Image (spheres, grey):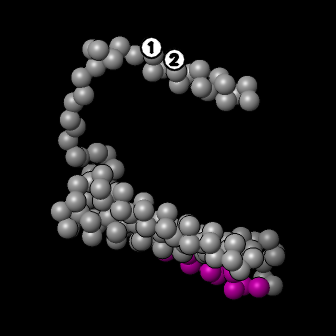
Amino acid sequence: MALMALFLLAIVGAIVGRDWKAYTPTLQSEGSPLSSAANDESVWVLVFVVTALALGGGATLFVSGDSYSASLVTAGGIVVVVALALAFLFYLFYGTYSAAKARGFQRAAAVMAGSWILGLLVISGITAKLLLG
């Protein structure tokens, strides 16, 4: 409770302490470091190679059975499951985002659509767990 009170005081201090009358918002260009990295082919190749090696190593550990310790085999299985889940979530979000951008939505609306799809997936999972559990 004390930590949350300090956090609340820090937020209030940051908001009150800023000279809002002198604040004028400026428009920034669409080019952020993340978007410039997304347009670089070498970054995509590096991410693909690292992902393929991680999935391949995890799958090899998972199917190795008695060659390695049980905890290492379990870790390999966890790596594969987490990597595939993250790839699915990225594909779902980015597919929705790019489809919305292609239909003329602004960036904020496209991000909202992608987030809405991920939220719908979470709500569906919670509903299934409540109904089946």
According to the picture, the residue beneath numbered tag 1 turns out to be: 17
The answer to whether any part of residue 90 appears in the image is no
Q: Are marks 1 and 2 in contact (CB under 8 Å)?
A: yes
Q: Main secondary structure of the magenta part?
A: helix
What residue do we see at 73% from left, 25% from top?
A: 2
Quarter location, residue 132: bottom right
Q: Is residue 129 magenta?
A: no
- The percent coordinates of residue 69 (x first, y second) are 81, 75
**Callout 2 crowding tier (Cα within 10 Å): few <14, some 14–19, many ≥20:** few
- The percent coordinates of residue 50 (x first, y second) are 48, 67
What residue do we see at 42% from left, 62% from top?
A: 116
The answer to whether any part of residue 127 appears in the image is yes
Q: Looking at the figure, which quarter contains the N terminus?
A: top right
Q: Give the amino acid at mark 1.
A: Gly
Query: Which secondary structure lies at badge 2?
Result: helix
Distance of label 1 from label 2 (alpha carbons): 6 Å
Quarter location, residue 77: bottom right
Q: Looking at the figure, which quarter contains the C terminus?
A: bottom right
Q: Is residue 58 magenta?
A: yes
Q: Residue furthest front?
A: 131
Q: Which residues are magenta?
A: 51-65
Which one is in front, 93 or 5? 5
Q: Which mark is residue 75?
A: none
According to the picture, the residue beneath numbered tag 2 turns out to be: 13
Query: Which secondary structure lies at badge 1?
Result: helix
Which one is in front, 39 or 72? 39
- The percent coordinates of residue 120 (x first, y second) are 49, 68
Left or right, 120 with respect to 72, comes to: left
